[in-house]
Image (cartoon, helix red, strand yellow):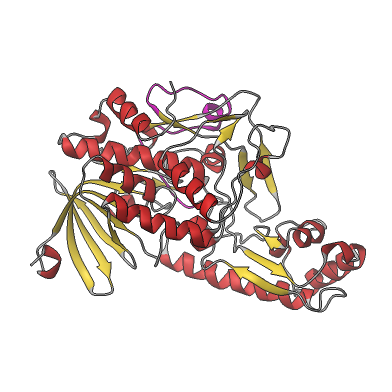
Amino acid sequence: MSPADRPGVPETYDVVVVGGGPAGVPASIQAARLGSRVLLIEKNGGLGGTTTTVGVNLPGLFHAWGEQVIAGIGWELLAAAVELGGDTLPDFTDDERPHYLRQVRVNPYVYGAVLMEAVAAAGVHPALHTMLAGAHWDGNAWQLLVCSKEGLRSVGAARLVDCTGDADAVGLAGLARVRNPELQPGTLVYRLSGYDPGSLDYDVLDGAYESAVTAGDLVPSDFGAHDRPLRGFLRKYGDTAMHLPGVDGATGRGRSAAEAAGRASLLRVLRFLRRQPGLERVTVAYCGAEVGIRESTTIVAQRQVTAEDYLAARRFDDAVCHSFYPIDIHRPDGDGIYKVFLDQGRVPTIPRSAMIPRDNAYAIVAGRAIAGDQAAHSAFRVQATAMATGQAAGAMAALAAARAARVDEVDLEDLRRVLRRNGAIVPS
């Protein structure tokens, strides 16, 4: 009889990873490759997170200035899904193309299946439809409370990796988190069909839009901008254009409110568009299962990455991976995006110290919840960087568990050798 079958007897693992998204899957596979017994906790019925559940299936950027700067486990899985799905990789050498055209588009259904296969092949123990309900460091190990369909059960872990995106595990452990006074809006990703964007009279549509906003039938953020937004919105068939201001993604109540607001926005848009000439047959071809969250809380870590660090491409002495994406702040009121692009040749790095909670170095965080100010965070929050930090976190957790050491006591050169052996690109 296993511990899971005996109430009150904890299961024990070397590494527990919470969150099976862009950071959590590489983290769990990397830890398992190093011989750790790994549990991967995921609240949804499949893996992939933002890519598969939210529908942002453009997990870039992996290349900078014509060269690959992020590789490793995340890239291996993405490339496998692209090939199997019959898609093609973009031309990464053409830096004149907008950054969004150099992102890798992947079939989310194929990608999700590839992730499940890879996790199983690595020997990771997946716990889907499961959430973390409590976390306590007892001085020797993590004592975790896990909630699944069967109820609550105890799990022990030598080291804990938080890949939830909102630092949920860190919060449950009572460790410090911070949030900015004004958060970037969320987005319900959906794609429209049933019309020809080239045949529409946008002057007529703009007039109808302004009348609908005045009447209260529409909210400007429904289309992601406040000034003549319909051209861009309809030409890209909706996609990731709409904004949901005031979203609190760090709480269940806030997420519930965001899901309701996202669907209400979708219905407003659909009812408005179907009354317009040329859009009578518009319909929803796809809608994400969840609202996408850009920003909620980040950890208070040993170090914070600032916008100055990021734009200057600071080479931290404890850097574990690169990041490459422009400063990309979606304005809190939902009115468009503020961008700052990196200067030619600059490639930022992410330090280990921004991933380790200040008050407990037996846990580590990967993905968008690592420590950074709002501007830096808006750039490194993207999926490619999450994959890179996830792999690094999984390696650090496994090495620390094997040596009964703090995460920040893992020798950096040992860590970098492990990452390179597993295909990662590590800043020199």
- Which of the 4 quarters of the picture holds residue 271? bottom right
Residue 81, image x, y percentages: 50, 52
Q: Is the magenta stretch mostly helix, strand or loop?
A: loop
Depth check: give the residue in front, 225 or 241.
241
Q: How many labels does the image show?
A: 0
Image position, residue 84 (x, y; %) = 51, 54
- Give residue 291's quadrant in the image: bottom right
Q: In which quarter of the image is residue 194?
A: bottom right
In the image, residue 271 above or below residue 111: below
Identify whether 408 is placed above or below 161.
above
Where residue 188 appears, as percent x and y from the top left, is 59, 64
Which range is magenta?
296-319
Residue 306 lies in the magenta stretch: yes
Examine the rendering and report whether any part of residue 19 can be seen.
no
Horizontal side of 138 relative to 18 (left or right) equals left
- Dividing the image into 4 quarters, which one contains the C terminus? top left
Name the residue located 91 percent from the left edge and 68 percent from the top edge: 204
Q: Split into 4 quadrants, where in the image is the N terminus?
A: bottom left
Q: Which of these two is toward me, 354 or 38?
A: 38
Is residue 314 shown left or right of residue 125?
A: right
Residue 172 image point, x, y percent: 29, 55
Camera sees residue 9: yes
